[in-house]
Amino acid sequence: MDQYYGIAIGGTLTLLGVLVPTIFNWLNSKGQRKAEEKRYRRELVFKIGFDLWLHHLEFSKYLNERFKKEATMHPPETYVLHFSKFLDLFDEELSSADLEKRIRENHEFTKRIEQLMLELEKEHEVTLRKRE
């Protein structure tokens, strides 16, 4: 009878010896996957925002040449931050009313960023004029 307890304990310890590292490896790989997804998302947001900014820049140049009218451009940070908030919409399932509310919030967020960037640009111009 004691012999069976020894075998049972040995088998249990063997299973635990295999199971514990497996759980730690699974948790580690899950964390690495999340980190990779975050990194990919950051790269995607930056690429999309910056590409859109470049397209707007080219369009502004075209307008300047064609109509001899200066077009205003927001800095690239505005586009990158806008797309960062925009992608957040796809992280959760939303009803149509919630989606509309979130889109309006994102629009307000983008408008605040644009205002802040314009204020910072004006402050920078004032600083440069004082130095001259």
Image (tube, grey):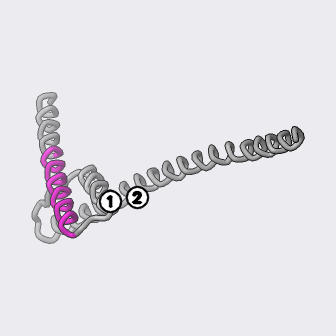
Place of residue 85 in the rendered image (x, y in percent of width and height, measured from the top left): 27, 55
Q: Quadrant of residue 49?
A: bottom left
Point 31% across, 57% down: residue: 88
Considering depth in this image, is 3 or 59 the residue closer to the camera? 3
Q: Which mark sits nearer the N-terminus, 1 or 2?
A: 2
Amino acid at dot 1: Leu
Where disc 1 sits, the SS reads helix
Q: Using the rendered view, name the quadrant where residue 94 is placed.
A: bottom left
Residue pictured at 36% horizontal, 54% vertical: 46
Q: Quadrant of the C terminus?
A: top left
Q: Residues within 10 Å of mark 2 (few under 14, many from 20)?
A: some
Q: Give the answer, above or below, for where 13 lies relative to 71.
A: above
Q: Seen in the image, is 45 located left or right of residue 21?
A: left
Question: 22 or 37: which is nearer to us?
Answer: 22
Q: Which residue is mark 2?
A: 44
Task: Provide the residue span drawn in magenta.
Answer: 96-117
Res 3 → quadrant: top right
The question of residue 10 being in magenta is answered with no
Question: What is the magenta segment's predominant secondary structure?
Answer: helix
- Is residue 21 visible from the viewing direction of this image? yes
| Image disc number at residue 87 | 1
Q: In this view of the protein, which residue sits in the foreground, 39 or 125?
A: 39
**Is the residue under label 2 in contact with that under label 1 (CB below 8 Å)?**
yes
* Left or right of residue 27, residue 87 in this image: left
Direction top: furthest residue: 131
Q: Which mark is residue 58?
A: none
